[in-house]
Image (cartoon, coloured by chain):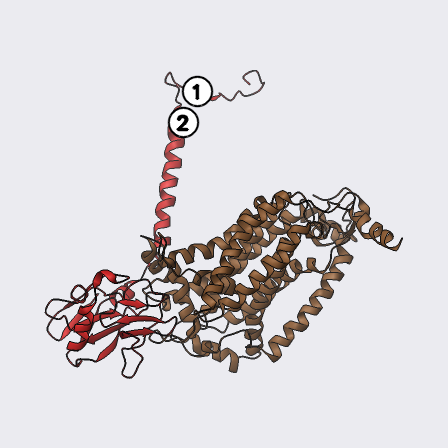
Amino acid sequence: MAETTGTVTPDAASMAGEDGFRRRDFIHIAAVSAAGVGGVVTLLPLVSQMSPSRDVLAASTTEVDVSAIEPGQAIKAEFRKQPLFVRRLTPTEIDEANAVDVASLRDPASLIERTKDGHHDMLVTMGICTHLGCVPLGAAEGENKGDYGGYFCPCHGSHYDTAGRIRKGPAPANLVVPDYEFTSDSVIRVG
Amino acid sequence: MSFAWARQYEPQNAFMKWMDERLPLPRLVYNAVGAGYPVPRNLNYMWNFGVLAGFFLVVQIITGVILAMHYAANQTVAFATVEHIMRNVNWGWLMRYAHANGASFFFIVVYLHIFRGFFYSSYKAPREMIWLLGVVIFLLMMATAFMGYVLPWGQMSFWGAQVITGLFGAIPLVGENLQIWILGGYAPDNAALNRFFSLHFLLPFVIAAVVILHVWALHIPGSSNPTGVEVKSESDTVPFHPYYTAKDGFGLGVVLIFFAIMVFFAPNALGHPDNYIEANPLSTPALIVPEWYFYPFYAILRAFTFDFILPAKLWGVLAMFASILVWFFLPWLDKGAVRSGHYRPLFRKFFWFGLIPCMAALFYLGGAHAEEPYIMLSQFATAYYFLHFLVILPIISSIEKPEPLPYSITDAVLGGKAATEA
């Protein structure tokens, strides 16, 4: 190509130094790298704007006063726009839950593990069936509590026991126990 | 590209000539869907559904843009603005019913279009790219339809969003965070409603763009035909206009009669009454089901009820996505050289007595309660569905002895008739 007439464009080989690199190679790599890094960094806000906004995150903690719940009663609260079941178990219900061989369960867990020390009669679970996300019955008075006296999901017939553990039906796991703590004897803070 | 004998565009007057030299858009249309596109002369009515699908895409975009003028994607008022459209907006009821039923008709004609492709093996070389783009269009349609159904913010909208985004939650490790990212919260709420509206507005135009690629890819080899024999000479083809504009026009008239019947006399027949109850995160409808056009895939999702290495729920999600992704591999799973089902005796039997009843069963089961015997039947139908594409089709297409093909399309049209008359 060096034989062509007119202005001769130096080819890569003639521009290269003794080490085989051109000065311009550095500019090419630096420019493309900077553009690449810049492009990726620009993606961050585009992706991250989809994540929960500050007001949604701010509502991600809920305090519930549990003092008025009598043994055998339950209340439905709202946590992160989802139903939360808070239930004070009767001694009979606690005995029923403890009488089960934990190893025989689909999702093995004991009532002790699923409740807080000093408050083993207070069962706090999400009111969301682990199958397809329906809201189980059993928290309100007169609702069907299922074959095991806990909760019953009407969508596809999952039965939960008095510790909120899956006992029968298609759900794969126990009702989820969210992160929570007792801020006093009468109030729990969830989330 | 086109056949050598394709008619050439000639501007009819000075203005069109001026135009043609600067922006040859009329020439493009002439070559794409006008007299400049030679089409096999033997297409039957199953070849109407591509044009009909395009028609319903246009219906959806026009009615959708109009609805967006009166709708507000805010969780506090979304449900009310839909009722506002129904009661206050001039002709609002017509726009909404046309849009809701238009979605159903879009899916009806697209399903028929896809099954035309199955029977006549339209996906085979050299038309693989048309088929692949078609599957992409179908996936985009599903995403668009799902997000559109969330917008009225009724009970089925809310719980459908909960269940479908929950599918992503089943993915190991990243699933839960992925679901929260998709929703912009811990449950479907204002953030989810807003982004679904934004994407529901965007995706139809993406579909339109892929449709252009789909048609472009179609014009490289030209349309397939019921014999599956490629075009050999000019006598095998007729110009798209006026022959198929007329035939498609007739088909469109027939479909519009059914569309009008649904819009004017049974506008809610394909919907769910629960969606006229405003979304309530604390109460679940007794039966959560998607719109009818998702039933087969919902049946496959729910067919997995037992853990096997992976949790049952994840199997269901994987199977549901795989049931459509398997279509991408169809051009290579079907090994037969002959295209048309008319000349493939074994293939034909498995199509009519295997795949079709299987799909019909899945359609029925997806809308049924998840209890016996429906679960077991779903499992059988799901197993057969995958068996058909992954085992039966490769085997029968390898061992099958096809019936003799006509020499050409012209022979099939004229010679065949002459032979039976003789």
Q: Residue furthest bottom?
A: A142
Name the residue beneath numbered marker 2: A24
As displayed, is residue B229 above or below residue A89? above
Residue type at tag 1: Met
Could you say where residue B10 lies in the image, as x and y percent from the top left? 78, 49
**In the rendered view, does B47 fall on the left or right side of B70?**
right
Query: Which chain is red in the rendering?
Result: A
Name the residue beneath numbered marker 1: A15
Check the rendered structure and report the hue given to chain B. brown
Q: Are marks 2 and 1 on the same chain?
A: yes
As displayed, is residue B52 above or below residue B271? above
**Is the residue under label 1 in contact with that under label 2 (CB below 8 Å)?**
yes
Residue occupying image coordinates x 48% and y 70%: B368
Sequence order check: which comes first, mark 2 or mark 1? 1
| Secondary structure under the numbered disc 1 in the rendered image | helix
Return the residue nearer the eye: B319 or A107.
A107
Could you say where residue A38 lies in the image, as x and y percent from the top left? 36, 43
Could you say where residue A68 lies in the image, as x and y percent from the top left? 16, 81
